[in-house]
Amino acid sequence: MNGAAPEPAPRRRGVAPRDDVALMEGYYSPQIDVDVRLNTNEAPESPPAAFLEELSGGIAGIAFNRYPDREAVALRSAVAELHGVGVESVYCANGSNEVLQSLLLAYGGPGRAVALFEPTYALHSHIARVTGTDVLAGRRDTDYLIEEGELERVIAEGERTHGGANPVLTFICSPNNPTGRVEPTALIERALRRAPGLVVVDEAYGQFAPSSALELGAVDNLVVVRTFSKTWSLAALRLGYAIAAPEVVEALFAVTLPYHLDALKQLAGRLALSYGDDMAGRVERLVAERRRLVAALGGLAVEVCPSDANFVLFRPTAKDAKQVWGELVDRSILVRDISTVPHLEGFLRVTIGAAAENDAFLAALRASLA
Ligand SMILES: *Cc1c(COP(=O)(O)O)cnc(C)c1O
């Protein structure tokens, strides 16, 4: 305003992020302000009121001036009890995404490779790349399951290109996000026998499925990853865990920052696990809602993929998916647009919500397709 010459812009330092990191796009799902949010597979209900009360009461007992239990023994013991394993087989972190990151920090890295089967959860390959790990991407078959021949092909490729211990991790998302089906136990067993490294079964939706890799018991190269974000109505808490051999848990701790789990989270996670019956009831209701939604979609001009999770993948057959997505937003309903993801062209993914939300979604979809 006073006519003085503007200050010269501060000189940028000559430092830039690693080339491969600069090229990456972060994981991102647009959060639009709508009435009905069915885009991120969260639970539709809040956690039980009694849990929230118990948690409020417990907060006063936390020694906030002290660092939390570094090994989160009480929380890990509660998870261990839930799954009938020893505490030394449980690793907890800030969301199952951080569990995946710890796995890649401990076992991945330059010169190493992981296997996965597309289309699948984007964070597996994303975190692999962030940690400088090579990604060997196999394909799912037309039903979006993993064929034994393809499993063999990708593992053999890892051994050939990166040496016999590779792929160091083989990721199997089951039920697979975003397609929805659980992998047959025989396929998981085949992977456990064949893979030279660890087989990481991401069971973020395990509670909604008829089978789980946890039923296989302790297998030394099996890592099952779960989360509090979906079934346990605690996406805001950021808590997930792995059940794995004690040596694996030790390796994960070795790459984890000290005191990574705050005391409040440790308390909340431990308390939540005492509401197992309540959670089982919620899962039952969501599975019943999923059946109802899939049946209703059957009467519309959409192709529907079978689902063992709390979401359903569908493809409008007579109208452009992006247009349908936009018309749902116009009616204040947000679903996930994955219509440009390779091999999923034209598909949308809807999270199973509460009955009224699912009704609102169905009504809006009917109107859009009419
Ligand atoms: C939602 C999701 C997760 C992530 O969960 P957080 O525990 O919230 O980090 C992990 N894996 C899959 C397949 C998911 O869909």
Image (cartoon, helix red, strand yellow):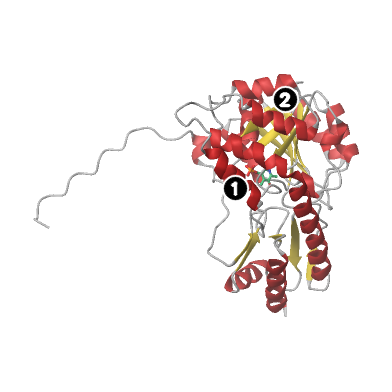
Q: Position of residue 256 (x, y in %)?
A: 57, 26
Q: Position of residue 215 (x, y in %)?
A: 86, 35
Front-lying residue, 292 or 54: 54
Residue type at numbered disc 2: Val
| Quadrant location, the N terminus | bottom left
> Can the viewer see residue 295?
yes
Q: Is residue 148 depicted above or below 332 in this figure?
A: above
Total numbered labels: 2
Q: Quadrant of residue 292?
A: bottom right
- Which residue is drawn at the image coordinates 81% and 59% (left, top)? 305
Front-lying residue, 338 or 67: 67
Q: Position of residue 188 (x, y in %)?
A: 85, 36
> Can the viewer see residue 125?
no
| Quadrant location, the C terminus | bottom right
Q: Which mark is residue 53?
A: 1
- Which residue is drawn at the image coordinates 57% and 24% (left, top)? 70
Left or right: where 35 falls relative to 343? left
Q: Which residue is mark 2?
A: 87
Left or right: where 59 falls relative to 16? right
Q: CA distance from mark 2 to mark 1?
A: 27 Å
Mark nearer the N terminus (2 vs 1) = 1
Q: Position of residue 321 (x, y in %)?
A: 67, 67
Q: Quadrant of residue 164?
A: top right
